[in-house]
Image (cartoon, helix red, strand yellow):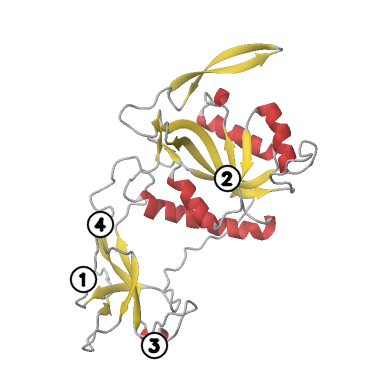
Amino acid sequence: MGWWFRLSWESDIPVLEEVQDDFGDEPVEGKWAFHGAFQLVGNGSVTNASCGMFKGFKGCIRDHLHDKVGLDGVDYTGKAFIRIVRYGCDKPSCPVCFKSGWAVREAGNIERRLKEASKRFGSVEHIVASVPVRDYGLKFESLRKKVLDILVARGVVGGTLIFHGARYNLQRHWYWSPHFHVLGFISGGCRGCKKGCLNCGGFEGRTRRAFEKDGYIVKVFDKRKTVFGTAWYQLNHSSLKVGVVRFHIATWFGVCSYRKLKVVVQKPNDSCPICGEELVRLHHLGVRRIVKVKGESGYVPCFYDSIVGADGSPNWCEAPKVHFGSGN
């Protein structure tokens, strides 16, 4: 916990208010992008020794469905699709698992929910709301609520809110600068225009007029390539609150809140890119050396291989399903 001074006003007289917050007034010694109760994701301790270790293979060896040439012009006849599987805890604090586990899962959930919402509210847009220094002293929940009011005032009708406690540049490296990224929906037009925007009814006019009152800089980024890619990238350098078991880094609001938007988000199928069938656990029987350690030369997470070897013997076979019975 830390103490900040916030500038407020009584009539026309500025007043300094002493406010306690969640953040602390200084970065924690020996930690990077760590400030008070908040830290950058992936900056915690490894959950257990198995995180990131090789677990096995999943793939598809249905040769009768792979007798085709793909849209990319590659002949997949006789080819198996293979994916390396690793152990993971899916925790945002884990430096091994946060990018390839937690962030992938969360970005997938965000993409699927926003895809459904876009059928009603239009294209998904990427927005950032930067907190002015005078509000650094607000407690996190109060700050989040205020940012939601700031967004509504600018016509942001709903989406997912991702908290970032720090920014990075080459001079200062990681430094405390709370802001929120949003993937969501905005009512009205006018993005980034310069002429007459103070008087128009679109986003640019609204955000400029609102800035004069609240001091929050809210910008819309250029159109993103994919919702998943943008969500994944923003999650990768988001911030979490230490010691809170169920602290939600990405939260939903407005027309996309759980109360207002009922979406059944089904778990995506782990499917073969050649035939679309579900992947199964596989055993490797061939002589090909497969690099299993991430970071070593020659490592690839997914690849294609011949289903059978030159001598006609199988390179891959389906692993038996494990059933847990009574032991009788």
Task: Name the secondary structure under disc 2.
Answer: strand
Q: What is the number of the mark on residue 308? A: none
- Type of the residue with mark 2: Val
Task: Name the secondary structure under disc 1.
Answer: loop
Q: Nearer the viewer, mark 1 or mark 4?
A: 1
CA gap, disc 3 and disc 1: 26 Å
- What residue is shown with label 1? 289
Kindly identify the residue that appears in the image at 34 percent across and 85 percent down.
78
Q: Quadrant of residue 120?
A: bottom right
Q: Is residue 28 left or right of residue 312?
A: right
CA gap, disc 1 and disc 2: 44 Å
* Label 2 environment density (alpha carbons within 10 Å; few <14, some 14–19, many ≥20): many
Question: Quadrant where the C terminus lies?
Answer: bottom left
- What residue is shown with label 3? 64
Q: Is residue 169 left or right of residue 259?
A: left
Question: Quadrant where the N terminus lies?
Answer: top left
Q: What is the number of the mark on residue 182? A: 2
